[in-house]
Amino acid sequence: MTAPLSLGVAGLGTVGAGLLRLLNDQHDRLRQTVGRDINVVAVSARDKTKDRGVSVDGLQWFDNAVDLATSPDIDVFVELIGGEEGVARKAVEAALAAGKHVVTANKALLAEHGTSLARLAEENNVALNYEAAVAGGIPAIKTMREGLAGNSISRVYGILNGTCNYIMTRMQEEAAPFADVLADAQAKGYAEADPTFDIGGFDTAHKLSLLTSLAFGTEVAFDQVHVEGIEQITEADIESADALGYRIKLLGVAQMTSSGIEARVHPAMVPKNSAVGEVSGVTNCVAIDAQPVGNLLLVGPGAGAGPTASAVAGDIVDIARGVIVPPFIVPAKDLKPHKPAGLNAHHGAYYVRLAILDQPGAMAAIAKRMGDEGVSLESIVQRREKSELPGIDAPNAAGKPTQATLITHDTTEHAMRAALDGIEADGKVAERPQMIRIEPL
Amino acid sequence: MTAPLSLGVAGLGTVGAGLLRLLNDQHDRLRQTVGRDINVVAVSARDKTKDRGVSVDGLQWFDNAVDLATSPDIDVFVELIGGEEGVARKAVEAALAAGKHVVTANKALLAEHGTSLARLAEENNVALNYEAAVAGGIPAIKTMREGLAGNSISRVYGILNGTCNYIMTRMQEEAAPFADVLADAQAKGYAEADPTFDIGGFDTAHKLSLLTSLAFGTEVAFDQVHVEGIEQITEADIESADALGYRIKLLGVAQMTSSGIEARVHPAMVPKNSAVGEVSGVTNCVAIDAQPVGNLLLVGPGAGAGPTASAVAGDIVDIARGVIVPPFIVPAKDLKPHKPAGLNAHHGAYYVRLAILDQPGAMAAIAKRMGDEGVSLESIVQRREKSELPGIDAPNAAGKPTQATLITHDTTEHAMRAALDGIEADGKVAERPQMIRIEPL
């Protein structure tokens, strides 16, 4: 039997404690399958005395994670501290430079420094595994790095943030406004006190930047991701989407186009009668379109101690088995620059919701702006008092704006934005038009 | 750079030809990611002159796959011949004994001889990889063997046969009878001329027997799988399921219970508003319930040249990277005997459809039989002329049986069978009652 694999675990929050418990509970079974012992020998955290529901007796204690990272007693440094700079970055860099394998759940660190960390790992012939950094317990990284190694990926997309999906699901199920659902989610611990990072789409963008590199063999380019959050989605949008056969989900989408890579995070309409449309609550999903395999969809828990510990354990098991795969599939020195397509070139269908002022010729002016930009309409639904009325320029309560929902045929983002800017400039709408991209599945 | 990996491919049907094309198209990219060349050096098939749309010029040709399997020029034997005995079995055994890695898509071979082949592979320190044997392009085996290595699996289930799911989907969408849809599926090439193997559930059972071993660390026991097909599902069942919020899917389910392993293939009701319920047409899925990860679902193409070639290529890439994992996770010598639970102990809810004879007291007699066996009812729907009528003993066209649909609360298979046997013995029904298990997701 091969020598034991010795781990140092930095960060003993719920994930770290969950990992210690898992490695303890499954110790004998893991030894049976990988042919060697996997032992935690050292840990680091802020407070040695805190009760974590799991014993750290007999383990070396380090107050400083960087010291743990370079300890001669460990083979693998497990980073569960978090944060893109500070001690997490210092410790991971120190571990890699010292020839330690690294397993991390830190998406922010990889989104900001993924390419250079991958280079450092490869120079030192060690693994940099980060399954838990994207979509928690879903084996998306393994699937892309290994299972689909023979494929060309054309698009990867997913629901990558449980907080947003929880909020969108409850808005839809309860016909409740965004602010109310967010407040309740905060009270229940599903959303942070400062929710910007989640609901603004930035967490999704971190994860998407990693999936983008894996899909297209490009350097990690978080700053090239177009990011919109869910703050502007209203009950009216959710309700209209439902009537039109859609759900609204915050998607991260990375797509190879003829003009470059589209990497975008935004609310998107997906068919409600689809597996993606049925991904509800805090559940995440990752979809991969590739040749020759076709379309794959992976659904599962995107966060939490158990799913994260499961993903981290899978990464550790790979190292124990001697599996070292380049972090972004192709060697870091061969990663190509990320060439962004520019969102204006995005091609697709759109949902538009307009509050049309009660003025003669308002609808005609709107239709003209669309026509001038070459945007043709698949459907128009005017709404009044939560019921739907077919037809154009239907009567409305005098003086109140008419709510109208348009679905366009395929067009470009550039044309859509020009048309909506024109409509706003004409002064025929009571508020800025709402525009939501429709993502074909 | 490590020495090239040399492959011998036996079987050049659409999958074999697709694999040759993939390895040719992706040759440089694969070399970049695995750090060595992956070269097909030899092939074997029945007819050397056949046009396969891919050139075999420059490759060694073997008329006999067994000779190819032991050729000193190959490192990996790729078996795409099929069949549980004959040349496929002989060639795989010869390859493993000769110290060649084996990649196969042959579910029948593994379902019948998986344990002994795994032992042979491990004795010779070679890989036996079979991702393509279960659910085609879905990386279910990799996920279970590697990604979830730190988990305890309690249940694995899935839609594992595209032909059945295609038929069930069309029956549901078109309200068409089984025989008509099957005939059309045969005409279109989605079902074999002799469809028994697919629609009888045996193909699903082959795949399930492999998932069962992976989930529970047990010897492969195809003969312990309870198998029912979809032949008895009627339009009335599909329609009733829809009205009750369900879809009917042919599932393979392996579940650990206190009395042993339940491994069963049968039509099952699943919620229509669920990701599994939305898996339509020839698409497959594999769901895994495990601790601590929670519930994972993988959805994708279950068959076809592209998905199968993708899975085979993934297996080859693992070998090129030096990854050798025990075929059934734990070493074959440590696999436990498969201890079946016996279906009578199955615990769950049931759907029952009855054609109740127009006789006084018929419904009362039926209710008594259910009550005597401790089966309590969650709902009763009586149907007439394709519309639904609420209530019990509603009037019906004189003399014609009344169609009634019952949903039970959780009970046992033993109690259900006893109740239905009693109902039939009472002579109150015009035909054998239909019983479909409800699978909780």
Image (spheres, coloured by chain):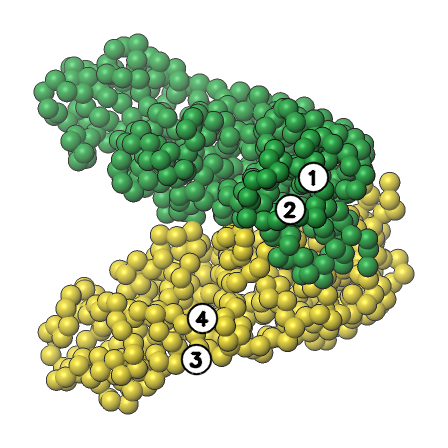
Chain colours: A green, B yellow
**Residues at discs 1 and 2 both on one chain:** yes
Q: Marks 4/2: CA distance?
A: 48 Å
Q: Residue at x 43, y 74 (%)?
A: B346
Foreground: disc 1 or disc 4: 1
- Measured Cα–Cα span from mark 2 to mark 3: 46 Å
Above or below, B335 against B324 in this view is below
Q: Which mark is residue B344?
A: 3
Sooner in the amino-acid sequence: mark 4 or mark 3? 4
**Residue at (33% x, 35% y) in the render:** A184
Q: Quadrant of residue A242?
A: top left
Q: Which residue is mark 2?
A: A56
Parent chain of label 1: A
Residue type, numbered disc 2: Val
Labels 1 & 3 near each other (Cβ < 8 A) = no
Which residue corresponds to mark 4?
B266
Give a yes or no on whether discs 2 and 3 share a subunit: no
> Circle 1 — which element?
strand
